[in-house]
Every structure is written in structure tokens, then in C-alpha cells.
Image (tube, helix red, strand yellow):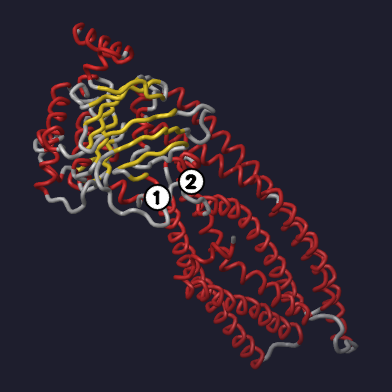
Amino acid sequence: MIKRLFSYYKNYKIYAIMSPVLMLLEVIADVAIPMLMGLILNRVQSKTLGTEDIKYIILVGCAMVALALFAMFCGAYSNRLAAIASMGAGAELREELFVKIQSFSFADIDKFSTPSLITRMTTDVNNLQQSSMTVLRMAIRSPFMFLFALIAAMMISVKLACIFLVAVPILAIVIVVIMRKAHPRFTKFQGEIDNLNTSVQENLVNIRVVKTFVRENHEEEKFKKSNDSLTHTAINAIKLVIMNMPIMQLIIYACIIAILWFGSNLVLDTSIGHVLGTISEGAGIMSGNLMSLITYVTQILMSLMMLSMMFLQFTRARASADRIIEVLDTEPSLTNPAEPITQVRDGSIEFENVSFKYSGGTIDDTLKSINFSIKSGETIGIIGSTGSAKSTLVQLIPRLYDVTGGSVSVGGVNVKNYDLTVLRDSVAMVLQKNTLFSGTIRENMKWGDKEASDEEIIEALKHAQAWSFVSSFPNGLDTDLSQGGTNLSGGQKQRLCIARALLKKPKIIILDDSTSAVDMATDAKIMEAFEAELKDTTTIIIAQRIRSIQTADRIIVLDEGKLNAMGTHEELLESNEIYRDIYISQQEGVLAQ
């Protein structure tokens, strides 16, 4: 996993290498400073200060200041380079995640859920960025600080330096225990973030429905449950991690106290020995050396503490990395064949014994044994009760989902044999949920054809009965749309989406209940424009109103995922009970009005 994640640093090698190098230089300077400090204190302790001694102290003091400034520069610049490397690598990882998600089918996205994918691209990647920035610095600083400070401490006094060795096994045991217990807790914590994001996203996307039904209190309770669960999980994870710091500090201060206790006796022996002239070479210890030793032992133990904190941060990053790798390792369920067909001959469609079931859905198939053929250029209506799988049926044509049984053919070729881009470019689909993006009307229209001229855009808008309101805006095609087109009415959004689909000049166009928010007169004009302008285009219209499809060449009646009947309006009125009941109920509704 680490090797794979560090592959994203290939464009940031210089930064990733120079950051540890500068950190190593900082460590060398930090380790040298206590030694110089010890020299000054030893000179003060050993004799009465004269002019030469003062010069010596000033010279060594200046060296300490220079080393401190050098260490500060190396540390600051190392942090900067580490930030550039980690943030850059994180950006590349996030981009690859985004590209990967773009290749997912609807079924793949359903598997992870949208909020979870958002969390993985944001929070989880941020965790990795912070951890990698820490690793670039601490993975060098802590081990080398430990090594260099240990050598310096041993050079001063092997006996006193050995005191901290008692602390090492204790520290190691604490780190291992906390890491093993923290990983599953942080994994659960990231999952709770997914749940919270789901609650927030669902509420904000559907805020109008929430306010319409006055369900703010209900949504607040839902959010509170998710938020409280996240808080409880976070506390459960963090309360284990925070035990690390007091244990580390307890061990550090215990070691310092022990060194001060034993070291002070050695210093006392040394001072008495100097007075009596009985001090032998190698016996006792100077006060300056004791202060240096305390500093080195502190550096040793602090380096171990930093290592422990780095490992704990790595534990959370590992949970995030697992979730990211899961996305990257997921093979899209819809892929191009080995030798894809790159041209769609025409808009003919054939369903042959098609069955379909959503993954993780009910045991029964959503679509069952569907068989029908559509000639190129035909206009086909689809009607049925809510839940009869009308939208599911048409989503199999551009291969947004793959059939679980049977086959779907377009232009006489199984859709699985086409290049996905070619197939979907040949099929324009106006989904049941109208989606517009933030930007101008012109920018939204160019989703249909990025090279479309203003004249082509206006023509498409006219066919979709949208130019009348677009031309009334002060900025016309340059009118800004808010996210989701919330500054437009439902009918206006539907007509813009239809115009965008027309710009593709597709071989097949599918309208999934996409005129439900327009009045009957406008609906009729749209259908007339389709008949006049899309003679060679296969048109499939899913509708709740029979008036929207009664002029279609044929109409499909779906009932509980099965093809109940197929025929003209007149044929179905005469022979199909479901169609006739729908027609009569709608006629009665019109008369009642």
C-alpha cells in the first residue's frame, strides 16, 4: 500500500528528497547545540573567568546562535518542501480517484454511495496528505535525532545515558497496543463521516421538499443521530490515542528525574575532587556535561514520542488509505470489449429476452423476459404504473446498466460490443431528474455539442420550446444558472435539458418523463417539433400522460417489470385493459377540470 501511494510522488521527487535532507541537517544542528552549551558551562565551572574565557564563551555562544538560525531555516524550508510534495501528490491521487469514479457505472456508484465517494476524495485524501507530510519530516528527524543524541549522550556518560534504555521497551509496548486497537476504531470513524455526509447531502439536495412538508424537525433529529454517532465514534477512537501523550510524558520526566538524581551526585563528586585535587581522569561529571546529557536524553525521548505520534497518525491514515485503495482497485462493471465497434449504423433497437436486477436489490428481477424490436426512426411511447421499471428499461439502451439476462442491440449490434463513448454519443437521454450545471445557458447547451454555434443552440432551443423564455432574459444565452438550475422553473429546466439533448443530433433520443412539468399545449408543440425535425431519429418517450404519446408509432405498456402489451393508441384502447383504464382515468380528470 505504501509503495503504491508513494508512486504519486513521481512528479515531486526533488521536493520529497530535499525535505528529509534539510530535516537531517536540522537534526545535526540541534544535536550540536547542547554540546556547545556544555562547553560553556564546563568553562564556567572549572575556573575563574578571565579575558580569554570570556572570548571563548562569546565565540561558542555565537556558534550556538548560528546553528540555531541554520536549524530554523532548514526546518522551515523542509516543512515547505514537504507540504509541496504531499499536497501535490494528494492532488494527483484525488484526480486519479475522480477519473476512476467517472469510469464507474451506475451500479458501481450505487455500491459505494455518492456521499462515501465524496468523503474518500476529500477527508480521506486529506488524511493521507497530512500523514505523508508528517512522514517526510518525522520519519527522518525522529530516528536520526534518536541516533545522534544517543551517541552524544554515550560520549558524555554511558552509565547515565543507559537510564533511558529502561523506557524504550515500555514506549514500544504502548505504541503497539494503541496502534492495534486504534485502527478498527478509525475505520469505523471514517464510515460515520460517510453517514453524516449522506444526511447532509440528502437534506440540502431536497431542502425544498423538506420545507414543503415542514419536516425540518424530523431532519434535525436525523442529523443529530448521525452527528452524535460520529461524535461518539470519534471520542472512542481519540480517547485511546490521547493516552499516548501522558504515558510518554510520565516516562520522559521519570528519566530526567533519575538522571538529575544520579548526575547531581557525580557533579558533586567532581566539584569536591577539583577542590581537593583528588579528581581522577574519567571520574565524575562536569555540570555542563550533565546539562548537555539531560538535553540529549530529552531529545532521545522526544524523538521516540514523535515516532509514536507518527505511528498513531499513520494508523488513521491507513484506514483512509484502505478506503481509497478500495475505490482504485474496483474494476468498472461496464468496460469496452477487446475490439469495440466504433460506429452505430442506425437507431434500431432490439430487446431479446431481457432480464435485469439491481445489485443488492430484491430477489426478484426488476425486468423480466422483455422482448420487442424498434425500427430506426420510429417514435415509441412507454407507459405504465409507478414502479413498473420504465426508467430502468431505457437505461439499458445506452448501457448505463448491463442486463443480467438476454441482450440489448442497437443498430443490429449487441450494446456490449460497442465502444461506450460511441454508443452513448449516439443516444441522447433526458433523464427523469433534470440536471443543469452552474454556468451560463450557453455552457450548459454545449454539453450536447461543445462545438455548437449560437445559431445551432437557438434552433435547438426553439424545437424544445425554450427560446421564448431564454430570449426574454436580459443576458440571453449568457444568463447564469445556479447549481442545479434552481433559478429556473421545473418546466424551463426540462425544456433546456431537451434542447441540450437535441444538440447531440443522436440516432436515438430518450425522453424519460421529461415533459411532466410543462403544460399540455407546450408538450404538444414539442412533440410536433420532434415529428418534423427527428424523422430519422428513433424517439422513445416515457410519459405519465397518454396525450404525450398517443401519436407515437407504437406504445409499450409495462406492468411490474413485464411487457404487458405493445401497439398503437387505437389498438391498445381496444385490446389492453391497463392502457384503457389509464386513458379513461385521465379523460375523466380532464373533463372534471
| x and y, in percent, of residue 107 in the image | 46, 40
Image position of 255 with respect to 373: above or below: below
Which comes before the other along the chain, label 1 or label 2? 1
**Closer to the camera in the image, 155 or 411:** 411
Query: Identity of the amino acid at label 2?
Result: Thr
| Residue 362 is at least partly visible in this image | yes
| x and y, in percent, of residue 545 in the image | 25, 20
- As drawn, is 385 to the left or to the right of 190? left
Q: Residue at x 19, y 7 (%)?
A: 591
**Closer to the camera in the image, 39 or 533:** 533
In front of the other: label 1 or label 2? 1
The residue singled out by tag 1 in the image is 102
**Closer to the camera in the image, 218 or 38:** 218
The residue singled out by tag 2 in the image is 119
Q: Residue at x 77, y 82 (%)?
A: 155
Indicate which disc residue 35 carries. none
